[in-house]
Amino acid sequence: MSWWSYSNYQDSKDDLQREIAHRKKKGETFVAVEAPKGNKLAVKFWGQSWQRHLESYADYESRLPRGRSYLRKGNVYNLNIDKGSVTAQVAGQSLYEVSIGISPLKPAHWQDIQKQCAGQIGSLLDLLGGKVGDSVLKVITDRDQGLFPGPKEIKINCNCLDWADLCKHAAAVLYAIGLRFDAEPELFFKLRGVNYEDLVSQAADAVAQEPAAGNAVVIADDDISAMFGIDMGGALSPEAEAALTGVAAKPEKASKKTAAKRAAKKAAKKAAKPKPKAKAKKVAR
Ligand SMILES: [Zn+2]
């Protein structure tokens, strides 16, 4: 860069800062997306998967890196992720408005993914933390049939003069989205227009629909209590109980009663059999 082009660059940068300061004075907010200091941008599951997915497309591969340095310099402001759309402002030669439309997941596609993941995601925390098994991982990160949008589902708009589909400003915003998913993974699902709870409630439904497993639990619990004469309640950690029963939600009900207590109850019931009398009394009154 020669000295005069450097000074031009400096001028436009100063102009830009003045413009931002001016707009701030008028009440506009400018919140920069903070980029981490290290080499990597996104480091958690949803952010990294988003990033890797986009980098896997040749259309983007050559243009994405220019966005990285923009983001690192703190040039992306006011990132907003909503259903089907992302907006941000990016400081370059001037302040550019970037909007990125992402097609929502088609209902049939979403249902298909739910089916494929049914019963395999332990909790919302696991899902949002990316703690999922290999088969779920395969389903959701599948390049063509997974949850992440392909280039045809991404419509990029920037008011700069770069005619390329993906200018460096939009590339910076795409990376900023990944960073935001690191902090708020639920926004990924919001962007794609689906409710992430659907993936986990499918799991709960699948467990509820297996009465055989449920029965086996109770029998196993009673058997162990009866065989060894121990109180199962509190004898096992909740995790161990869950592993034994396969039902994490209500392991207490079945386990707190010992076989002895049950037997005592039965006996008491037998002894207090003449209940119909009480009924007759009521009728007489
Ligand atoms: Zn642009």
Image (spheres, helix red, strand yellow):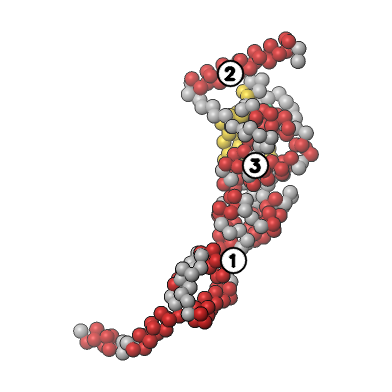
Label 1 sits on a secondary structure element that is helix
Residue 97 seen from this side: no
Residue 68, by quadrant, is top right
Where 87 falls versus 110 (above or below)? Answer: above
Which disc is residue 43 wearing? 3
Q: In this rendering, which labeled residue sits more in front, label 3 or label 2?
A: 3
Instruction: Pick whichever, 87 or 171, lies toward us.
Output: 171
Q: Who comes first in sequence, dot 1 or dot 3?
A: 3
Residue position marked by numbered label 1 in the rendering:
206
Q: Is mark 2 within 8 Å of ligand 1?
A: no
Residue 123 placement (x, y as % from top left): 56, 57
Q: Are marks 1 and 3 in contact (CB under 8 Å)?
A: no
Residue 15 placement (x, y as % from top left): 60, 15
Label 2 vs label 1: CA separation? 56 Å
Residue at 57% in and 36% down: 80
Instruction: Pick whichever, 39 or 15, lies toward us.
Output: 39
Residue at 56% in and 43% down: 184
- Amino acid found under the numbered disc labelled 3: Val
Residue position marked by numbered label 2 in the rendering:
17
Residue at 68% in and 54% down: 137
